[in-house]
Image (cartoon, rainbow, N blue to C red):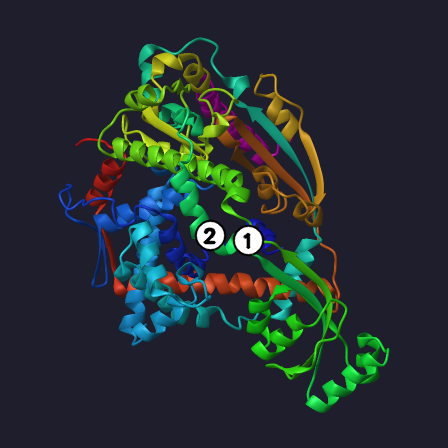
Amino acid sequence: MLQFFRNFFKSKLGVPVMLAFLVLIGLAFASADVANTGTFGGVSGGDRVAVVGDQRISTADLAAAMTAALDNEKQQNPTLTMQAFIAQGGMDRVLNELLQRTAISEYARKHGLRAGDRLIDSELVQIPAFRGADGKFDNEAFQAVLRQRGLSEALVRQDIAAGLFARQVLLPATFGTAVPESLAQRYARLLRERRQGSIAVLPSTAFAPEGAPTAEQLQAYYRENNSDYIRPERRVISYATFGEEVLGDTPAPTDAQIAARYEQNREQYAASESRTFTQLVVPTQAAAKAVADRVAAGTSLAAAASASGLATTTVGPVTKAAFAAQTSQAVADAAFAAGQGAVAAPARGGLGWYVLRVDQIDRKPARSLADVRGEIAESLAAELRRTAFLDIAARIEEQLEEGGSLAEVADELNLELQTTRPLTADGRVYGTDETAPPVLAPALRTAFDMEEEEPQLAEVEPGKTFLVFGVTDITPSAPAPLAQIREDVIADWRRSVGSERAKAAAQRVLQRVQKGQALAAALAAEKVQLPPIDPVNMGREELAQAQQVPPVLALLFSMAKGTVKRLEAPQDNGWFVVQLDQVTVPEMERQDPLVGATRQQLAGVFGEEYAEQLVKAAQREVGVERNQEAIDAVARQLTGQTE
């Protein structure tokens, strides 16, 4: 319902700034390059993109934030590139977040708020990534995460401090927000209103030119809209897999190796005895003797224990040494002195006095070297083969790190190299619905981060199968050449021109209706074959049930009765002319449950608006100055453009 109000009653969509601040640290950790994006101090326009109060936001800060934001977006869209991200407005959003975050921090400091080291420490210890095996904060884990993510401790602490300032400033502004009952009742009534009207569609295709554009027109359109034709980065990967088969025949273990392994594990082959017991523990020696006497007289140990209000347990199989460690040496001596089925003499252990019945005795005779020679030889051969295989993998990895080529490794191990068709970062073959070979799954992300002709080694099945791979060709993300997509661009040009003409036609229709002409007649005056008018009779509750509300219906439910408006359809597909004829709003009792629910929802909306307005006021108070030249330079640097 909150979203319903914000969409249809012209309340601003309010950015939940406090939430953006509180996830900044998570965003930073999602990036592997925050601290390694390079220095932009030499770009034109200076080394800062903005000044907020006394705080400078450097070009490196903006570049780091952009890298982090892009990496976060790639979790949902792996093929997204920096160029496309910026074209979609990503830099404006990231910069605005930086400015808002810094303004709140500066405002908080100006008014005496603090985020001291101890408070920051208390936040650090709550971050799961920094906890050790015992669930507590571990400095080594903390430092390891920082190294892995390329972050500095100072940057992490700075981000946490910004989040703390945001809490101190924004949460009080949103806490306890109240909405008058009369206002909630009015909005609740609107939820049950019903609207009747008409929607006319003027599609671009009806007004699009039939002929082809001139070369100049086509080139100009392509230049203005080339961000719509950006192709994702493509990479060709060469690879091969190998397992223990690369070893060929390996020497069998020698007699000396077998004998040494036997001596190393002599205890394993020595004679052994383990026992299983029914156990009863009582607090005193007298009680233990009484139980033992009843058992000797013919009562079962379980019945004797039950008569005393106790219960027996089963223990074992267990060796004498292990049992002594669990109880005491005296208990173990007594337990292993008794025969099978007998009750051992009571003895004192750590929990009290033990009464034990021997249920089962398992004795294993000693095994000589001759007895276990085959077993040891088989185990040792597998172990030596595995060691030799891992040695080869380690040697190959070292060889690649020292500049060895993929072809050299393939020749040395007699592997057959395979080469993929161009792949995109989401694991698909470019231009098709096919996916990359499954064996490349563990290496695909790395393959899109590595340089060309710098092969690497990866494990497919730990310790059993390895993948050696390299990138042999990289096609950077860029707009497709006009010559390759000429027909698509021509179709888009026609639709764009058609949209402009449909816009003019929609304006003419609008003016005719405003002068008193019926919508159908105003539409017919265009002398163009158009779809029939679509009548609408819908309530807000029906609209609220839709998962996604079409913009044209959103407009219908935000208009005044008796008005007519036009609206552009998405993606240059045409224009709508919307006429609202009737609005029916039923009366509502104050006790209606919808009033209370509306009041509660509106309180949250108002709280967000208060927070948004407070952020804007903080920006005005501390002062924000942008350096557009430096901002543009960062954008060029991030997208690899030259001056």
Q: Is residue 503 magenta?
A: yes
Foreground: disc 2 or disc 1: 2
> What range is drawn magenta here?
494-518
Secondary structure of the residue carrying numbered label 2: loop
Quick one: label 2 or label 1, which is nearer the N terminus?
1
Q: In this view, does 99 lie above or below 231?
A: below
As rendered, which of 440 and 577 lies closer to the eye?
440
Residue 98 screen position, x and y as percent: 32, 54
Residue 158 screen position, x and y as percent: 29, 63
Secondary structure of the residue carrying numbered label 1: helix
Quarter of the image where one finds residue 275: bottom right
Tag 2: amino acid: Asn
Q: Is residue 386 above or below residue 223?
A: below
Hey, which residue is sitting farthest top in the picture? 211
Quarter of the image where one finds residue 247: top left
What residue is drawn where x is 45% and y is 55%? Answer: 15
As rendered, which of 153 and 368 lies closer to the eye?
368
- The residue that disc 2 covers is 265
- The residue that disc 1 covers is 6
As rendered, which of 416 and 273 lies closer to the eye?
273
Residues tagged 2 and 1 counted as in contact (Cβ below 8 A): no
Tag 1: amino acid: Arg
What residue is drawn where x is 45% and y is 36%? Answer: 381
How many tags in the picture? 2
Q: Is residue 65 magenta?
A: no
Cα gap from disc 2 to disc 1, whole angstroms: 74 Å
Q: Residues within 10 Å of mark 2 (few under 14, many from 20)?
A: few
On residue 594, the disc is: none
